[in-house]
Amino acid sequence: MSITRVLSAALLAVGLAAGPAVADDASPSPSASEDGGAPTQAGTSFRTATELDQGQQATASGSTGDYLYWSFPADSGQRPDVKATVKLPDSHGTQTWQLDVYDGLRRRQACQYGAATRTAPQGAATVQLACVMRTVRAWSEPWANDPLPGTYYVRLTVVDLGNADLGQPVSTEVRVDSKDIGGAAAVDGSLAKPLVPGIAVSADKSDDGKAAVLSSFGSDDGWSSGWWTDRWVWTGVGGVLAALAGIGGYALTRGTGRPRQVPPGV
């Protein structure tokens, strides 16, 4: 009877811990319809990059040969997914488009998977690009190129085309979503400040009492503000299971408490 109770308690503890974790993973990302106004233009450099929130779909018009820039925030534990669609003119030759993602230090970030460079054949109506980044880490070695919390830049441009197609009008769509990886990406450390433009002067007050900040968006709950991850849940579950296993082992091996040589009536 005692072994049955031990196993029942262990299964109940695992079920209670696993239920919320599965529900959190299945939660959808914010959609563009929930946001007020998505950007309708793009910047032409890192400094003029148009700010784009995750879940928004930005649109912009330009010409072949232009460099189009957007920026978006990404916090630790997130794995950003950047997608872009370029609508080409009715008549054009073969063109090769490329989607690049840079971090707050303007280091080009590698894509885990996705076609970040694609060639549109002659007469193609659109070309679609995608880049799924690595999971953003809360902390990294100074020499590493790991993605860290802060602002990320998206650059979209054509890298190969004929001279006759240079300057032709195109329209673009860019969307950034992300998946929350959770405790699996947690590390023992965190940045003092996110890699956000103007963070070095945001704490310094100017003469009129206003902070000089170059980026107006960020994480709603603060950058890497929460210490809680689902790793704590599984650590607690492991501790409970270890305690139950110890109790069960003791119940199986303790016997009746009387030596075999002693008669029952003594």
Image: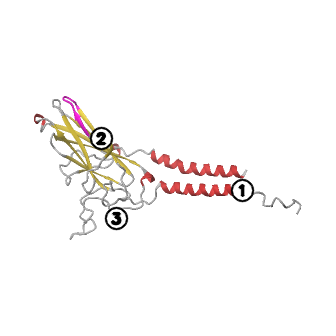
Callout 1, which amino acid?
Thr
User: Which of 148 and 91 lies nearest the eye of the viewer?
Assistant: 148
Q: Which residue lies furthest to the bottom in this view?
A: 207
In what element is the residue under mark 1? Answer: helix
Residue 63 in the image: state x and y as whole percent. Answer: 15, 40
User: Which of 11 and 225 lies nearest the eye of the viewer?
Assistant: 11
Q: Which residue is drawn at 63% across and 55% down?
A: 245
Q: Residue at x 60, y 54 (%)?
A: 241
Quadrant of the image occupied by residue 205: bottom left
Residue 203 in the image: state x and y as whole percent. Answer: 28, 67
Horizontal side of residue 16 vs 59, given as left or right: right
Q: What stretch is highlighted in magenta?
A: 117-125
Please rate how many residues cluster around mark 3, counting C-alpha atoms within 10 Å: few if below 14, some from 14 to 19, many from 20.
few
Q: Residue furthest front?
A: 261
Mark 3 → mark 1, Cα distance in angstroms: 52 Å
Q: Is residue 242 magenta?
A: no
On screen, residue 156 above or below 257: above
Q: Mark 3 points at which residue?
A: 192
